[in-house]
Image (tube, rainbow, N blue to C red):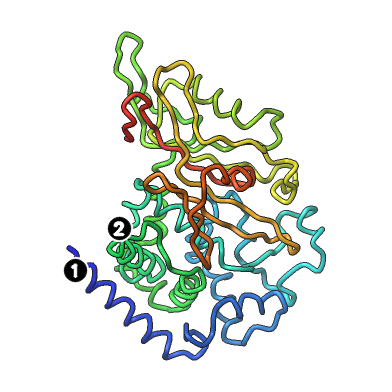
Amino acid sequence: MEISTIKRSSRILKELNHRFNRDKHYTLRDNSLNYKVSGLAKNKLPNKSKHIIDILSKNNEAKAILNLFYNMLKLPKSHIFLRDKINYFPSKANNYKKNPSSPIGILGVSWLNALLQFMIAIKSIRNMFYFAPKSFFSFNLFLDTYEIDKKNQKDIVSIKSDILLECLLKKFSEKNFITNRGKLDLYKILSLIMSIFYEENQVDQNFLIHKNSNFLSFRPACQIRFDLEKNISFESYIFNILNKSNILSKELLISFKWFSNGKRFFLNYKSMPKTKILFFNVKKLINVIYELDAFIEFRQDSSSFGHYITYVKKENLWYQCDDSRINIINENNLYLALSKSILLHYKFKNQKSSFYI
């Protein structure tokens, strides 16, 4: 298995280098995607790069795949893809608040690294990734780097976002990626990955706890969407759902409802629940605890586009996974980042035996 993984990694890296070196615009050594993306805001991209962005913005398969990624953050489709306008960005930041569907486009590459780091840290999602087509470079390069890093006793993937996004743009620009129907459908694979998370209002009768039984049943995972318009604390909102539920989940994926009545909540931190906790205790059941093991922080900046950073817990250590560096963070210093988190993953823990399911 180890020899096979190393050979596969070597093959993919060689193929990537060969492909990128054929095209001057995609040479990783010479042209970082950061330059192209920053040029997007100034509308000064090279013609070929603009052409690839146009392909992305018009191709339904590419849109569906990336929108499935971004749906985890509950952001609109227009946050990724550009509309057919001369100016790629609105002239005033206030337009974003008035019109949530304003074209925002791709600015920065932190979102891709943040999501992949978040998803690779969650075992139930990570296992699904291995069904991704070998021809899809972004997944495979990330997974192969993950395997190599593990062999080097690194707990976190060390690859940078700009390389991942270059793979993504390059692959979507190739005709055979769209026309070759013999390959596995990437959208279906990602849909399957996300299907492990059920909405909190979906009740599967097969998992109900019988009244006359001591048997405690679990469904795989539950997705909870916190409505920012509700005047209730974060803890109370989650406690209410867990305590009234007839079924327990092995995992909780907690996100936030960003849009309602034309308002875009995440631009204003005042609307965010400030206190988020590392543990949930389900009060009606003894020794049932959910422990936080991964979350994504959203940091605003002057452009209002923001920056995404993932925090994951491995072997009782917390790692801060930025797209340019990885740091070990003391748990006591997590709370500022946690207060700005937009996607959280909790895993069931049996308090008595400290056994993770």
State the residue position of label 2.
131
Looking at the rendered structure, the secondary structure element under dot 1 is: helix
Residue 33: x %, y % from top left: 55, 77
Name the residue: 56% across, 63% down.
110
- Residue type (three-letter) at the residue carrying disc 2: Phe
| Disc ID at residue 91 | none
Label 2 with label 1: CB-CB less than 8 Å: no
Of callouts 2 and 1, the N-terminal one: 1
235 horizontally vs 197: left or right: right
The quadrant of the rendering that contains the C terminus is top left
Residue 29: x %, y % from top left: 47, 85
Looking at the rendered structure, the secondary structure element under dot 2 is: loop
68 horizontally vs 156: left or right: right
State the residue position of label 1.
4
| Cα distance between the residues tagged 2 and 1 | 16 Å
- Residue type (three-letter) at the residue carrying disc 1: Ser
